[in-house]
Image (tube, grey):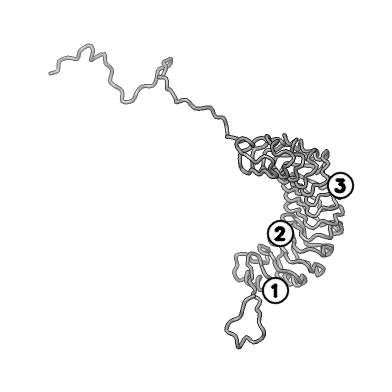
Amino acid sequence: DMGPPSEVDEARPEEPSVSPAVAPGERRARVVLPEVPPDEGPTYYRIGVDHIYEPGAEEIHFQCTRIRKLENLEAAGDRLRRLILIANAIDKIENLHTNVNLEHLELYQNELKRIENIAHLTNLTNLDLSFNKIRSTAPLGGCAFARLEQLYLSSNKIVDVEGIFHLTNLRLLELGSNRIRMVPNDIGNLQHLVQLWLGKNKIASMVLPPLPNLRHLSMQNNRLEVWQPEFFMNCAGLTHLYLGHNNLPTLPVEFGLLRQLVEVDLAKNAITQIRPLPELGKLEELWANDNQIEDLEEVRHLAAFPSLKTVYLERNPMHGHGDAEREARYKERILQAVPNLKQLDAEAFHQVRLITDGSEATVIGIRKA
């Protein structure tokens, strides 16, 4: 017999199985966290401090090196000809005042928002400001770049083409992947232009002024829906034409004016027929996949192109994509029309030329060319 409980035992409450919640007004024990060092962001490096170059260097090239500022180029001075700083974090063009003889300035894939502080670089032949955040090309209007031959401004935020029409020595102009809706007629001032790249914009008209020396033109991935006859007259010297990913219909007869054409991209448009154009005697590459050609009989018109070497027509309705029997018939009919074809879609045909004197019966083996 343990006897009656004491007063102390009676006053002691039953021990809870879980710690009770903190009553209102009571404070929990203070939790001390380890000190966190301040976040100073990514580490950037400096030209001439972290990234060293030889004094008097003619070329400075740093790629993916976390450079944030153009600085410390005085030691190179007027001997510097090529400055290439690709995929860094430079947000301003500055401090090039001593580098007056620069011929090649490449600031591809940085954080630039404007074109500035380069008007004194009058010896430039190549300027590449692609993959930045530039919205206007107007500042180039104050730059007397009489020797500039190549200007790259792709993948920026440019809406209007401006400030470049006095650069009459330009051979190459790259404005792809911007927000351009029209090409000004003033581009006709650039009479020496050989290559013009305008893909992935919002251009709705293919009309260009006369550009007699233009050989390469890209207007892929725009908003083209109509063939405009003056285009073929004004750009009759084209050898390479890229118009894929638009909404253009079947080729007009005026397409035959492009007699120098070697390669043409018409993929993913609204083409329903293959127009025979024997005038295109130099055409070697025809890309017209992902269109709306339904009748397999259309492929017979490929015979009109005597120099054809490569054809892409897959994923047209006539292809019968996924149907082995229809795909075999598609291939057979195209090879009947173009027996010397070297490539059909992704399939290359390896033709072997045999060198022989006619006495094959007496020789063991034949040498391959």
Q: Residue at x 62, y 76 (%)?
A: 368
Write down the residue under mark 2.
267
Q: Which mark is residue 173?
A: none
Tags 3 and 2 in contact by the CB under 8 Å rule? no
Q: Report x, y in % for residue 209.
A: 86, 52
Tag 1 or tag 2, which sits nearer the N-term?
A: 2
The crowd level at tag 2 (other Cα within 10 Å; few <14, some 14-19, many 20+) is many
User: Where's the N terminus, which quadrant?
Assistant: top left
Tell me: 29 left or right of 294: left
Q: Nearer the viewer, mark 3 or mark 2?
A: 3
Mark 2 residue element:
loop
Mark 1 residue element:
loop
Mark 3 residue element:
helix
Evaluate whether residue 278 shows in this view.
Answer: yes
Tell me: 338 left or right of 347: right
Q: Report x, y in % for residue 131.
A: 69, 44
Tag 2 or tag 3, which sits nearer the N-term?
A: 3
Write down the residue under mark 3.
186
Q: Which mark is residue 340?
A: 1
Q: Nearer the viewer, residue 263 or 79?
A: 79
Quote the CA–CA distance across marks 1 and 3. Answer: 44 Å
Tell me: 27 left or right of 179: left
User: Where's the C terminus, which quadrant?
Assistant: bottom right
Amino acid at the residue labelled 2: Ala
Q: Quadrant of residue 179?
A: top right
The crowd level at tag 3 (other Cα within 10 Å; few <14, some 14-19, many 20+) is some
Amino acid at the residue labelled 3: Asp
Quote the CA–CA distance across marks 2 and 1. Answer: 22 Å
